[in-house]
């Protein structure tokens, strides 16, 4: 056996999946080849040393967190019961003119809307309590809402979020999730439009570039290209090239990608 | 999807109990930071819930869950890269844990340090093969690379680990 | 209250058969959902409480000498299945090779989620209308409620006689005109994007291009770029929820209804 052969068999050696014949041949080789012997020895001992790395018990918080998440999901499913009352409380509290209260389930979808900065400087205790209640409705509620509301409701929720002056991270992330995953093309488009309003945030720009990589709908691809080009986001150049090279892409999209590349440079 | 039978949810609970420690430790070794390991583990189970209907029986569940874990890990590191221009190795650095370091002996600590210096991909394959004892074919499925590439990576990872360990040990001695 | 109604119908030959059912709770508006990969969907609103479903194949004319004189037998069978539970009716069309013209009569107050590979026509229905088609036009006549429509390659012609207040709407197409008639008293804010087309309206609109100047930067070519909105915004009757019009190649007509 030659040295290269031994080297090639090292992963199997470590995994213990060598045949008896292979084992014998390796042993025969290492007896007379000091460098290979050394290599095998040191790698084996490193491999063995890893054994001493103990497994840790996950903290109790993980357990709690999981069951909370599950509950949140199931709460979302019963949205018809939970949401109207939450929305009711919400509408009674918020009299901010910009959010002339639309009574829509989809607003909770953009939960960050209410979880972010408070509207008033002195927060009324009811608002604080509501905020806590809402914060316990995790992303899981959004998920189940996405599965259980109509596009019209979600569309309305997203378009309201577009009017926020300073959307916080959670709103942005929710909107990015919608761009990637909402079943309705129109809702995804409206999320792109909403995100465009926050184009100064690097998080938004990076998120939209990633979204372009995963979109399959030509309508979305064009909207994303438009937005990213309008933002002059150079980071999209690689994507545009990919779209142009990919055979399966709609020709209208390819054309737009090509145009976009020229506009960015 | 709209109708979630109770049976489905309790099944998820069972899966959680069975796999939480494995997934947590996978991330813990990858990352060496408890809070991050916790968050990422949570994310894995969120995705399992979310994508439960895409699971096809023909794939062994263990492999499916580690594929999800791989993706969660990858997304995490990509996000890190996106927000700040940090080296990915820096994203999860070894934090000297004063209690356990002493209990396990300094060698272990050195090994962990050397481990943290490896690239994410190398750390991952070592964890999957050494600690999760996954076959190379399964690791290939979970990480999306070829079996041959997995083997090469394991080999290189181990070499780098050994070299790193020796380098740090030498430093300590001197 | 929650009864699962499952009716399966097998179409064979050239007979046109009909499926008839009702929503679980006919007193409450229901929702109809269907995806038809090949063919057209036509929905008609009626005063009846029943849902009536029928379908017939759409044949293309073939002038093949071999066919000459012979009549075609519809040898391919396909299955139409409708499931109804808790006021949601779902029509599943099993894999078909011939495009179908699916016609469904529904109670006037019904919400629709329709996806089709070749066109959608809806008349006389009020509810949340969600329409998606890849090839083919979307035509909505005398509808009410809220509309979310998109088409890849086709026109969207809509006439809405009454609108649910507070709901956003969206009309999107890649290649095709958008021709939307709205009630004259509607309160909304329109957002219009068309890249290669003209926009016409007879509504009085308070236009704003939202010139949020984000501060210009000079790039290496010396071009000065300032961030201007690329969309046109207009407030109608004081403003309200957003109605988006989005087309790449096509004109946009926003008409004031009577």
Image (cartoon, rainbow, N blue to C red):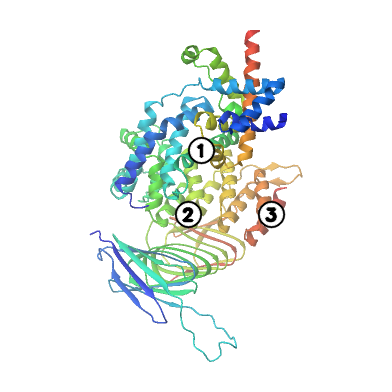
Assign a secondary structure to mark 2.
helix
- Crowd band around label 1 with a 10 angstrom C-alpha radius: few (<14), some (14–19), many (20+): some
Residue A134 at least partly seen: no
- Crowd band around label 3 with a 10 angstrom C-alpha radius: few (<14), some (14–19), many (20+): few
Judging from the image, mark 3 belongs to the subunit labelled: A
Write the residue at 60% across / 66% down.
C198
The correct choice, above or below, for C187 with respect to B5 in the image is: below
The correct choice, above or below, for B155 with respect to C157 in the image is: above
The correct choice, above or below, for A31 with respect to B4 in the image is: above
**The image quarter in which residue C130 lies:** bottom left
Write the residue at 63% across / 39% down.
B148
Which of B149 and B66 lies nearest the eye of the viewer?
B149
| Marks 1/2: CA–CA distance | 26 Å
Assign a secondary structure to mark 1.
helix
Q: Residue C223 location, x and y as percent?
A: 73, 46
| Marks 3/1: CA–CA distance | 28 Å
Residue A210 disc label: none
Which of A31 and C224 lies nearest the eye of the viewer?
A31
**Mark 3 sits on what residue?**
A245
Q: Residue A81 location, x and y as percent?
A: 28, 48
Residue A187 disc label: 2
**Mark 1 sits on what residue?**
B72
Asked whether disc 2 touches disc 3, contact meaning CB atoms under 8 Å apart, the reply is no
Residue A221 at least partly seen: yes
Asked whether disc 3 touches disc 1, contact meaning CB atoms under 8 Å apart, the reply is no
Q: Residue C37 location, x and y as percent?
A: 48, 67
| Marks 2/3: CA–CA distance | 28 Å
Do the residues at pointers 3 and 1 share their chain?
Answer: no
Quadrant of the frame with the N terminus of chain A: top right
Assign a secondary structure to mark 3.
helix
Mark 2 vs mark 3, foreground winner is 3
């Amino acid at each position: 056996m030659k040295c290269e052969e031994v080297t090639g068999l090292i992963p199997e050696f470590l995994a213990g999946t060598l045949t008896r014949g292979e084992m014998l041949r390796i042993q025969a080789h290492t007896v007379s080849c000091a460098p290979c012997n050394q290599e095998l020895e040191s790698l084996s001992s490193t491999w063995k040393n890893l054994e001493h790395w103990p497994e840790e018990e996950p903290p109790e918080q993980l357990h709690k967190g999981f069951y909370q998440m599950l509950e949140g999901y199931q709460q979302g499913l019963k949205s018809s019961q939970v949401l109207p009352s939450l929305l009711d409380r919400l509408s009674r509290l918020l009299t901010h003119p910009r959010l002339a209260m639309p009574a829509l389930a989809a607003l909770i979808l953009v939960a960050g809307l209410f979880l972010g900065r408070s509207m008033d400087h002195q927060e009324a205790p009811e608002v604080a309590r509501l905020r806590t209640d809402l914060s316990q409705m995790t992303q899981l509620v959004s998920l189940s809402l996405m599965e259980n509301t109509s596009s019209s409701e979600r569309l309305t929720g997203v378009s309201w979020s577009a009017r926020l002056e300073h959307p916080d991270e959670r709103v942005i992330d929710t909107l990015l999730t919608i761009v990637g995953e909402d079943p309705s093309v129109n809702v995804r488009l409206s999320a792109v439009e909403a995100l465009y309003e926050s184009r100064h945030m690097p998080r938004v720009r990076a998120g939209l570039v990633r979204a372009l990589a995963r979109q399959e709908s030509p309508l979305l691809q064009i909207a994303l290209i438009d937005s990213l080009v309008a933002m002059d986001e150079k980071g999209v150049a690689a994507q545009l090239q990919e779209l142009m090279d990919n055979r399966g892409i709609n020709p209208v999209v390819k054309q737009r990608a090509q145009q976009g590349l020229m506009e960015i440079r | 999807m709209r109708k979630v039978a109770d049976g489905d949810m309790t099944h998820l609970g069972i899966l959680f109990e069975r796999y939480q420690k494995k997934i947590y430790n996978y991330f813990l070794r990858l990352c060496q930071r408890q809070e991050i390991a916790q968050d990422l583990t949570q994310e894995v189970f969120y995705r399992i819930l979310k994508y439960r209907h895409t699971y096809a029986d023909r794939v062994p569940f263990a492999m499916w869950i580690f594929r999800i874990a791989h993706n969660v890990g990858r997304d995490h590191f990509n996000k890190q890269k996106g927000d700040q221009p940090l080296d990915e190795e820096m994203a999860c650095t070894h934090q000297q844990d004063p209690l356990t370091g002493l209990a396990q002996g300094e060698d272990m600590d050195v090994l962990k340090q050397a481990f943290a210096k490896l690239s994410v991909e190398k750390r991952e394959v070592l964890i999957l093969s050494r600690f999760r004892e996954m076959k190379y074919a399964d690791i290939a499925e979970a990480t999306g690379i070829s079996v041959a590439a997995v083997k090469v990576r394991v080999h290189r990872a181990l070499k780098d680990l050994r070299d790193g360990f020796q380098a740090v040990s030498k430093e300590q001695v001197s | 209250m929650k009864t699962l109604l499952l009716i399966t119908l097998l179409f064979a030959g050239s007979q046109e058969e009909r499926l008839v059912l009702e929503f679980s709770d006919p007193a409450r508006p229901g929702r109809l959902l269907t995806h038809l990969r090949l063919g057209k969907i036509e929905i008609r609103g009626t005063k009846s409480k029943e849902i009536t479903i029928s379908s017939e194949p759409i044949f293309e004319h073939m002038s093949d000498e071999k066919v000459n004189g012979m009549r075609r037998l519809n040898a391919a069978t396909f299955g139409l299945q409708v499931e109804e539970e808790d006021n949601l009716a779902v029509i599943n069309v099993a894999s078909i090779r011939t495009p179908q013209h699916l016609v469904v009569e529904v109670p006037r107050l019904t919400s629709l989620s329709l996806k089709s590979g070749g066109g959608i026509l809806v008349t006389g229905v009020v509810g949340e209308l969600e329409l998606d088609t890849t090839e083919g036009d979307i035509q909505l006549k005398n509808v009410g409620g809220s509309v979310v429509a998109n088409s890849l390659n086709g026109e969207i012609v809509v006439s809405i006689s009454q609108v649910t207040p507070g709901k956003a709407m969206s009309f999107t197409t890649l290649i095709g005109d958008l021709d939307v008639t709205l009630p004259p008293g509607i309160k909304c804010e329109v957002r219009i994007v068309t890249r290669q087309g003209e926009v016409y309206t007879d509504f009085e609109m308070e236009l704003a291009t939202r010139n949020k100047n984000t501060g210009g930067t000079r790039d290496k070519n010396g071009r000065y770029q300032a961030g201007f909105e690329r969309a046109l915004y207009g407030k109608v009757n004081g403003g309200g929820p957003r109605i988006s019009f989005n087309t790449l190649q096509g004109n946009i007509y926003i008409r004031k209804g009577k």
